[in-house]
Amino acid sequence: MTKVITFKNRSVPVHYPSEQLSYMELLHNKLLEMEYNFDFRKKWKRIKSVEMIRDVAILQYSDGTKLYLEVC
């Protein structure tokens, strides 16, 4: 399934399996926690999409590189 999340005025699609809806809430809470991390906010501007695999968010850049973020 796909859901669009917004963080700091930037919307990004999040792909996740349908049975893992609870991990979307964990991702939302982690983004709120990272709100004042300026390094993460700079990285967020280049994110193309996010893929959730259990409790790990894989942030994919437009150049193909990935950043792994543990959300629990």
Image: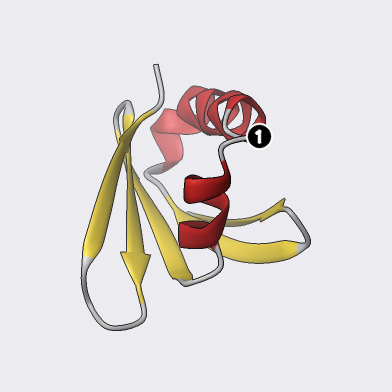
Please tell me which residue lies in front, 16 or 40. Answer: 40
Q: What x and y, as percent, mark residue 47?
A: 46, 67
Which residue is the extreme one toward the left? 65
Residue at image mark 1: 36
Residue that appears at 40% across and 47% down: 16
Q: What x and y, as percent, mark residue 63?
A: 27, 83
Which residue is the extreme one toward the bottom? 63
Q: Is residue 41 above or below residue 49?
A: above
Which residue is the extreme one toward the top? 72
Q: How is the image coloured?
A: secondary structure
Q: What x and y, as percent, mark residue 57?
A: 35, 41
At label 1, counting other C-alpha atoms closer than 10 Å, the crowd grade (few under 14, some 14-19, many 20 or more) is: few
Q: Is residue 29 above or below residue 17?
A: above
Q: From the viewer's perspective, is 9 left or right of 27?
A: right
How many numbered marks does the figure carry? 1
Image quadrant assignment for residue 4:
bottom right
Image quadrant assignment for residue 32:
top right
Q: What x and y, as percent, mark residue 38?
A: 57, 46
- Which residue type does callout 1 highlight? Tyr
Please tell me which residue lies in front, 40 or 58. Answer: 40
Q: Secondary structure at mark 1?
A: loop
Quadrant where the C terminus sits is: top left
Residue that appears at 33% across and 65% down: 60
Please tell me which residue lies in front, 55 or 17. Answer: 55
Image quadrant assignment for residue 11:
bottom right
Q: Is residue 1 above or below residue 37?
A: below
Q: From the viewer's perspective, is 26 left or right of 15?
A: right
Residue that appears at 49% across and 55% down: 14
Q: Is residue 18 above or below residue 3?
A: above
Residue that appears at 27% across and 52% down: 67
